[in-house]
Image: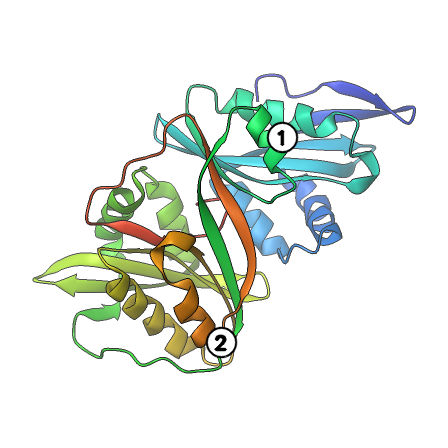
Amino acid sequence: MADTRKHMSNNNSEISLVKLESRHLEGALKLSQEFSWPYRLEDWQFAAEVGEGAVLERDGEVLGTAMWWRYGERFATAGMIIVTASVQGGGLGSRLFNALLDATEGRNVLLNSTEDGLPLYRRRGFEPWGMVHQHQGVLAVVPTVDRSDDIRPATADDLEAIQALDERAIGMPRHGLVAALFGAGEGTVLVRDGEIVGSAICRRFGRGYVVGPVAAASVEDAKQLICAHLVELGSQFVRIDVYADDGLSDWLKELGLPLAGEAVSMVHGTRPAPLAPYHMYAVANQSFS
């Protein structure tokens, strides 16, 4: 943010627009709880470590947040955009989002929007391109896994290959994010002819665990990578966010992970271009994409 402090009049008090700092995270957690978002404090801390953000605050109280993550010189994603109900409707959300757009100017920006957020994002030039399905719950059916030597736990020596695969599958260089996700969770890789051709990361998040990102060259490979984590999680609460067009939703429902929500995938500018046949089948979360 170029201008880290602007003052706005609201109920005779000053509301400041400032850079997100560690001192804001407890307030950000409280704000997300207001809207029943399942984030833990650790989830906010992780997001802040790998990205940047802006905060609306008044007398030390966090009233709004917006975050973004830069990937290379051309791309960024945005998320965790919240304004407390008590100050909505006064233009504060627009001012917060302006800070995000200023910080990511010159980049193609992606985000996943609820239905409520669509009008704001459309007005700012974002266009829909797809849909993310959020599945979560406790497994009703333990999946079977192809126990071939192709699928194995990832090691630190695999990180560089996983980062390269992630970039091919999503079309953006997210090496720092992938390293952080790998450090926070457990990875699985699919190996053929000595080459890593699929990867999945599972980590603690929200009410339990999240599986994603999942990068692979086919739906069947993606299923096997997901299953490799699900069989280890057993009766734990699991969340997986997948793209609607990829055909994984019905399969996840059969496993006992019902559809819990939908988000519209949008872009301001040009979408990144994955390198075929690789594809991102499950996102790390809807903010990181």
Query: Which kind of residue does numbered mark 2 sit on?
Result: Gly
Q: Is residue 286 above or below residue 252?
A: above
In the displayed structure, does residue 288 sit left or right of residue 270? right
Percent from the top left, x then y, of residue 273?
28, 36
* Secondary element at image label 1: helix
Percent from the top left, x then y, of residue 214?
34, 57
Percent from the top left, x then y, of residue 187?
33, 62
Which of the 4 image quarters holds residue 114?
top right
From this viewpoint, is residue 240 visible?
Answer: yes
- What residue do we see at 50% from left, 48% from top? 286
Mark 2 lies on residue: 256
The CA span between labels 2 and 1 is 35 Å
- What residue do we see at 35% from left, 41% from top? 174
- What residue do we see at 57% from left, 57% from top? 261
What sort of colour scheme is used for the picture? rainbow
Mark 1 lies on residue: 120
Quadrant containing the N terminus in the rendered view: top right
Q: Is residue 249 above or below residue 62?
A: below
Which of the 4 image quarters holds residue 94?
top right
Quadrant containing the C terminus in the rendered view: top left
